[in-house]
Amino acid sequence: MSYTPPFTISPSILDLVSQISEAVGKLEVLAPTAMTPKLRKDNRIKTITGTLAIEGNTLGIEKVTAIIEGKRVMGSVREIAEVNGAIKVYDNLDNFDYKKLNDLLSAHKMLMGEILTKAGSFRTSNVGVGGEEGVVHVAPPYDRVPELMGYLFDWLATTDIHPLIKSSVFHYELEFIHPFEDGNGRIGRLWQSLILYDWKPIFSALPIESVIKESQQGYYEALETAGSAGESTPFVAFMLQSILRSCKEELAIKRDVPINVPKNVPINRHKKIISLMQKNSAITIEQLANACEVSDKTIKRDIAKLKKEGKIERVGSLKSGYWNIKGVIQNEQA
């Protein structure tokens, strides 16, 4: 069965897509010099804190930072477990394929594993979603959830609409189906971020969830309005406005950073990657990205190019192997 979620691509939505695309282009130019490891870390902390705060978690940025650094903090067992799950799942963003339903289930298990006994499994009872005036949405019957989620992922894997719109429609549809006992909002926001990250790696460093938290009431109102309208259009518009706001805030932070990136930056980065591998043959993608101040995906592209040019090779698996620089004897590395 072919299924297309109901939504309308309005002129205002097209305008938002255009504005976001322009802002993302500017951020991509700035990224090599402005997106430092510290900024990426700070924004990831904002993302984790924001998405949990929307669901009522009271641990702020300082405590989330402390947990990431392995320090003990004061807080309820559940709230600390929520932070641990969020850290784990956002750190593994590169390992998920947004088109695969099984990956969503794995992500939910990772996110909610310390909280739910059935994390990573669809709910087995009927639910209603509450609001200030009582139940505002009665989710589809539990026995229809596997079928509906299957239809939704079939659409996600085959649609050719713009990723900005696709990610927002998917986010709404997941909240409408409400497939899990708990954690639906968190997994919906995570999966939208994953879709956007697949489109443009710069989204791995944009704290969209933090911006949503600042407009939390608007977020819930957009969900309710879309539910009343019978289509996701109002929610899509809200999410695009939030994404645009996030992009503009990041551009404002970087407004004093020079935007003219020298043409030899990639060449110099390749030299740096080789040098880092010579010093530490077991260096990871994440460590290379932090050292070079770029995204993981940029490092992966650099490595693919260096392999193609015959300058490096990977010996063994990514987990337990090492990098071999052609013509360099491993034992002689510093």
Image: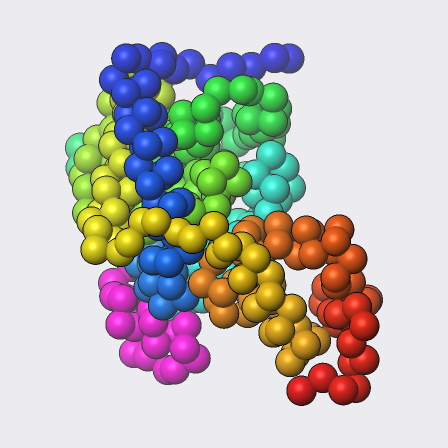
How many numbered discs sit on the rendered protein?
A: 0
x then y, percent, for residue 179: 50, 36
Q: Is residue 71 above or below residue 82?
A: below
Q: Is residue 227 left or right of residue 188?
A: left
Image quadrant where residue 86 sits: bottom left
Query: Looking at the image, which residue is at 37% across and 58% down?
Result: 33
Q: Is residue 140 left or right of residue 150?
A: left
Question: The C terminus appears in which quarter of the rendering?
Answer: bottom right
Front one among 219 and 249: 249
Magenta stretch bounds: 56-76
Q: Residue at x 26, y 56 (%)?
A: 257
Left or right of residue 178, residue 287 in this image: right
The image shows residue 41 at horizontal and vertical percentages of 38, 64
Q: Quadrant of the N terminus?
A: top right
Q: Which residue is located at x 57 percent, y 57 percent?
A: 267
Which secondary structure dominates the residues rendered in magenta?
loop
The reply to whether residue 171 is visible in this rendering is yes
Q: In this rendered view, identify the residue nearer to me: 109 or 131.
A: 109
Along the viewing direction, whichever of 155 and 27 lies nearer the viewer: 27
Is 64 within the magenta? yes
Foreground of the two, 133 or 113: 113
The reply to whether the magenta stretch includes residue 201 is no
124, above or below 275, in the image: above
At which x and y percent is residue 74? Answer: 29, 78
Identify the residue shown where x is 78% and y is 80%. Answer: 330
User: Residue 43, located in which quarter of the rendered image?
Assistant: bottom left
